[in-house]
């Protein structure tokens, strides 16, 4: 199986979460945005709570700002559909 890009992985994660009944807000896209550097890729609403997800490929690395958010517990790093479902559905 070929290694997927972060964009391909993100697309699969968004589709799976929406099929599971989640509301998914995508903050990352190919065009320039006004997001603050380090903003998570996805905000997911399920069962009365928001979960912030940073999508990375298996070899993808976090920026310093992303790392700080992950270390604070505010953001979860996911590298697959299974990772995302595990974080959001718990």
Image: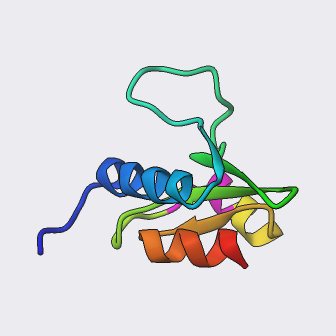
Residue with the most extreme right position: 48
Quarter of the image containing the C terminus?
Answer: bottom right
Residue closest to the eye, 53 or 11: 11
Q: Give the residue at x 65% y 63%.
A: 67
The answer to which quarter of the image holds residue 56 is bottom left
Locate residue 35, reporting x and y percent.
65, 28
Does residue 59 lie above or below 52 as drawn? Answer: below
Coloring basis for residues: rainbow
Membership of 10 in magenta stretch: no
Q: Say left or right for 27 vs 12.
A: right
Res. 79 visible in picture: no
Does residue 76 lie above or below 18 as drawn? Answer: below
Task: Tell me how many marks there are.
Answer: 0
Does residue 38 lie above or below 48 as drawn? Answer: above
Q: Give the residue at x 47% y 20%.
A: 32
Locate residue 46, reporting x and y percent.
75, 57
Q: Magenta stretch?
A: 62-67
Res. 81 visible in picture: yes
Q: Give the residue at x 62% y 55%.
A: 21
Residue closest to the eye, 66 or 27: 27
Quarter of the image containing the N terminus?
Answer: bottom left
Locate residue 13, reporting x and y percent.
45, 58
């Amino acid at each position: 199986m070929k290694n997927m890009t972060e964009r391909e992985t993100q697309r699969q994660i968004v589709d799976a979460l929406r099929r599971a009944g989640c509301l998914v807000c995508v903050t990352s896209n190919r065009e320039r945005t006004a997001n603050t550097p380090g903003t998570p890729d996805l905000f997911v609403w399920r069962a009365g709570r928001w979960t912030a997800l940073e999508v990375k490929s298996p070899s993808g690395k976090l920026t310093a700002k992303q790392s700080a958010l992950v270390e604070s517990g505010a953001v979860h790093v996911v590298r697959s559909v299974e990772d995302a479902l595990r974080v959001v559905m718990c």
